[in-house]
Image (tube, grey):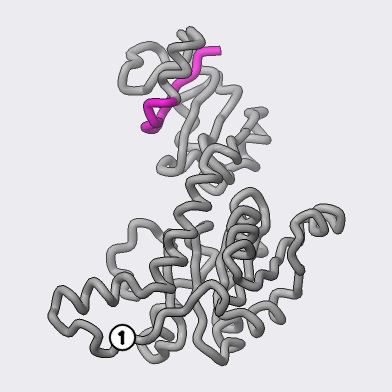
Amino acid sequence: MKTLVVEKIPAKFWNLVKERNLENVIPQNEYFGDFNKIEAIILRTRINCNKDYIAKFPNLKLIIRAGTGYDNIDVNYMKLKGIAVCNTPEANAQSAFEHTLSLILAVMKQLNYARNNVMDGSWKSGFEYNIEFADLKVLVVGVGRIGTRVASTLQFLGAEVKGIDPYLSDLEKTAKNIDFVDYNKGVKWDNLITYHCPLTEETFHYFNMDTFEMINKKIILINASRGPVVDNTMLEEKLSKDRNIFVVLDVWENEPDYSLDL
């Protein structure tokens, strides 16, 4: 099956291709043949893989997303065309978990504030006491490959952790060794909420005005899932008036949106 890699892929991937003599796997910038011969494509997150995009591959049979989720692929249209779609959910799970942990530590220890204070000479002026893991009540929204790593690590470090994941069976929830709660109750209970859920109709603007209005204390919001899970417009408006929430966004709506001012 002649396979075209249509986005940049780490060198480790190409090393494996070479080791396994997969001569039919070709980067797009090195392919000068007929697109009619392409039966599979490998992409990541930059390409909007829709009806218009795949029109140039009339004999396409397979789309591989090198990563988690399908939100940049029109899965329904591919199904109508008989094109199989698959992903690689373990590909970046460890990296995404480590990145989430670094974001949590950055806001807990106020690294940006500390750097800015040092750079402008204000030193400790206006600097609040850092919180510690034992102070955290963490709500993990989406306890899958990444969320599970986040939850178990934070528990080990001394945080209290609860989870939300409607896609898990009761047996799977028990195996996670954390308490699962209702979303609204969890938001009212926590002081750190971190999102690791897929983008679906149910999770679109999961953190919205109603969620914000339930918060009556200082809280840390982490979004390392998909941008539209958090209503950015609402958040930008609220943050201009209310500094009771610390926000760390790894993703946001309409990327890249350089007008966002949080």
Q: Name the residue nearer the viewer: 107 or 56.
A: 107
Instruction: Please say whether residue 139 is visible from this viewpoint.
Output: yes
Which residue is painted at 20% across and 82% down in the image?
123
Q: Is residue 249 above or below residue 30?
A: below
- Please provide percent x and percent y for residue 8: 36, 32
Q: Residue furthest right?
A: 171
Which residue is painted at 52% across and 52% down in the image?
97
Which residue is painted at 45% across and 25% down in the image?
13
Which region of the structure is painted magenta?
1-12
Q: Name the residue nearer the viewer: 19 or 210.
A: 19
Q: Is residue 92 above or below residue 197?
A: above
Query: Tag 1: residue type?
Result: Phe
Q: Secondary structure at mark 1?
A: loop
Is residue 157 rendered magenta in the image? no
Instruction: Please say whether residue 36 is visible from this viewpoint.
Output: no
Which residue is painted at 37% across and 26% down in the image?
11
- Please provide percent x and percent y for residue 57: 48, 23
Location of mark 1 (residue):
127
